[in-house]
Image: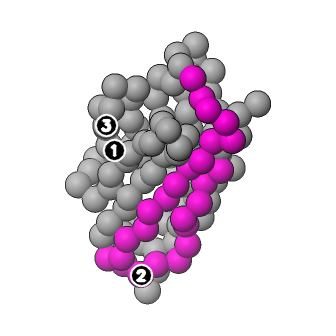
Amino acid sequence: QVQLVESGGGLVQPGESLRLSCAASQTIWSINTMAWYRQAPGKEREWVARISSDGRTYYADSVKGRCTISSDNAKNTMNLQMNSLKPEDTAVYYCKVVLQNARDFWGQGIQVTVSS
């Protein structure tokens, strides 16, 4: 069973940056997409960004221009660079991997808090 572990979260002030990472416990083959989601208190989980197997990236409007998703298949990791953070970015962030057979794996989530 593949396990995904997020890291890099924490408390930052508005305007600062964070880099989230997602590490897989083993090499994952036949990946379709890798993505980041987030869930703020009292809200539903929402998609933030994804990267397809061919390297194309997509972003939610709320983070477009401020976030960059990347992956390093050799290291079995995925990253989310977040700049110009806002209080509304406060949430638990989850990474997700979807295989070509539609099976998916989720990380346990990591807290990001943006507050002055």
Which of pointers 1 and 2 lies earlier in the amino acid sequence?
2
- Residue type at the position of mark 3: Thr
Q: Position of residue 82 (x, y in %)?
A: 37, 61
Q: Residue at x 46, y 74 (%)?
A: 114
Report the quarter where the C terminus lies.
Answer: bottom left
Residue closer to the observer: 64 or 76: 76
Q: Which residue is mark 3?
A: 57
What amino acid does circle 2 point to?
Gln
Label 2 and label 3: CA atoms lie apart by 27 Å
Determine the residue positioned at 42% across, 53% down: 80
Verify whether residue 40 appears in magenta. Answer: no
Q: Answer whether residue 110 is visible to the viewer in this image.
A: yes
| Residue annotated with mark 1 | 60
**What amino acid does circle 1 point to?**
Ala
Asked whether the viewer can see residue 36, the reply is no
Q: Which mark is residue 13?
A: 2
Farthest residue in the bottom direction? 116
Taking depth in this image into account, of 83 and 60 the one nearest to the observer is: 83
Image height of 32 relative to 83, above or below: above
Name, please, the residue furthest toward the right.
1
Residue 1 placement: quadrant: top right
Q: Which residues are magenta?
A: 5-29
Mark 1–mark 3 distance (CA, rounded to whole Å) = 10 Å
Tell me where residue 47 appears, x and y as whole percent: 45, 42
* Category of crowding for the residue at label 2, using alpha-carbon neighbours closer than 10 angstroms: few (below 14), some (14–19), many (at least 20): some
